[in-house]
Amino acid sequence: MTEKVVYDLEDDRWMKNLMNHKPDEGRVVLTFDDGPGRHLAAILDILKEKAVPAVFFWNTRLLYDQRPWRRVIDEGHLIGSHSHKHVNLTSLNQQKQYDEIKTSIDRIESITGQRVRYFRPPFGQFNEDTVAVLKSLDLTPVMWEITSYDWENKAEPGKTVCNVIDHVKAGSIILLHELEQTVEVLPELIDRLREEGYDFTLI
Ligand SMILES: [Zn+2]
């Protein structure tokens, strides 16, 4: 007799996130990694002007008091963890991964007073120890579907827009970074996505 397979919603939620796609018709998600940095205020200004919500995955070793984190929350964005020091988690044992992730969420929560629910692994690298840690901390992993390669486009920021527009589809989670060259093309990127018929949402 075959054992009955129980449909596990928890696993499904994990799969959906690991597949890097948000099943939400006509909307896309902008995510900004590796802050909070010195370009954060400029990014927030653009997002505010364009009325676009976004998700920020922060390395908490950069989370100084003077970063405008309150604006991020007040202006309707989400803050997730991108670890404390941005090390490749797969090079750490499970306890060290736990410390790295727990330090990060504690830091964000102690400053903002809000629970952190989302985590993006540095370099997109994780293993089963990471999965165990995230489950124990009730964190949902968020990967991405569209790589903008904004970090490679310092000389030609316009390429970032092309990389996104050429591959985006409804529900895409788009990977961006808090970089100067990203700020430079962000208004155009938002406008182009709207022209293509997309609206913006959070995860
Ligand atoms: Zn990163």
Image: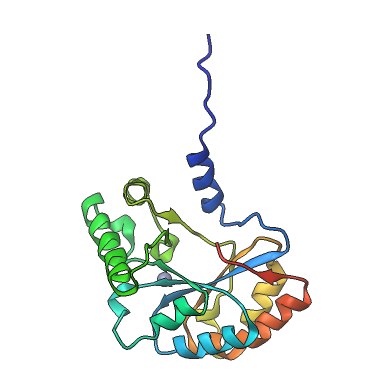
Q: Residue furthest top?
A: 1
Q: In this view, does 104 lie above or below 48?
A: above
* Relative depth, front residue between 39 and 94: 39
Residue 24 visible from this viewpoint = yes
Q: In this view, does 50 lie above or below 19?
A: below
Instruction: Report the label total.
Output: 0
Please tell me in which quarter of the rendered image ligand 1 is found: bottom left
Locate residue 131, reporting x and y percent: 37, 48
| Figure coloring | rainbow
Q: In this view, does 10 lie above or below 124?
A: above
Q: Residue at x 49, y 47 (%)?
A: 14
Q: Residue at x 73, y 63 (%)?
A: 26
Locate residue 90, reporting x and y percent: 33, 55
Q: In which quarter of the image is residue 173?
A: bottom right
Locate residue 156, reporting x and y percent: 60, 89
Residue 157 visible from this viewpoint = no
* Relative depth, front residue between 108 and 141: 108
Q: Quadrant of residue 201?
A: bottom right
Side (left or right) of 170 relative to 36: right
Q: Quarter of the image containing the C terminus?
A: bottom right
Side (left or right) of 53 relative to 93: right
Q: Residue at x 40, y 79 (%)?
A: 35
Locate residue 70, reporting x and y percent: 40, 81
Side (left or right) of 72 relative to 147: left
